[in-house]
């Protein structure tokens, strides 16, 4: 069953210049992952520090394999060090219920 993953981050202006290249690197790696279909990054109009990434995966298992991969975890640790609050993840399923 297809899965949509919502990833929310607060990115203060003082770290955006340093953090955005890391997020770009993460994005380049994710497109090569089994089960990855697509993704988009959105910034909240009313709160420019509020970012939302929406990615689509063939299955929750594909997403979890990427989430738990050593490659992603290493880059994620560097990203988290720059954020004032932890990244939030939500999984939504698409399809028949």
Image: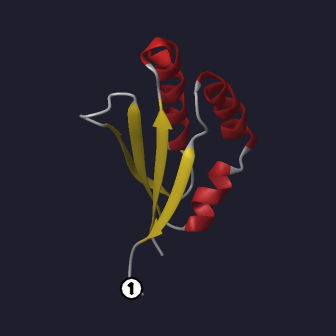
Q: Is residue 35 left or right of residue 67?
A: left
Q: Position of residue 56 (x, y in %)?
A: 42, 57
Label 1 Cα crowd, 10 Å radius (few <14 / some 14-19 / many 20+): few
Residue placed under numbered mark 1 in the picture? 96
Residue drawn at x 50%, y 15% is 15
Q: Is residue 48 left or right of residue 6?
A: left
Q: Quadrant of residue 17?
A: top left
Indicate whether 17 appears above or below 95: above
Which residue occupies the foreground of this view, 54 or 61? 54
Indicate whether 14 appears above or below 31: above
> Could you tell me which secondary element the residue under label 1 belongs to?
loop
Indicate whether 41 appears above or below 95: above
Residue drawn at x 51%, y 58% is 90
Residue drawn at x 63%, y 50% is 66
Q: Position of residue 16 (x, y in %)?
A: 45, 18
Q: Is residue 85 left or right of residue 93?
A: right
In the rendered view, how is the structure colored?
Answer: secondary structure
């Amino acid at each position: 069953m297809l899965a949509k993953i919502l990833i929310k981050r607060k990115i203060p202006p003082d770290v955006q210049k340093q953090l955005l290249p890391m997020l770009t690197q993460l994005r380049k790696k994710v497109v090569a992952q089994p089960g990855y279909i697509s993704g988009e990054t959105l910034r909240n109009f009313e709160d420019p520090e509020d970012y939302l990434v929406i990615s689509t995966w063939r299955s929750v298992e594909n997403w979890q394999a990427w989430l738990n991969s050593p490659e992603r975890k290493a880059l994620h640790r560097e990203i988290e060090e720059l954020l004032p609050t932890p990244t939030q993840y939500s999984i939504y399923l698409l399809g028949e219920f």
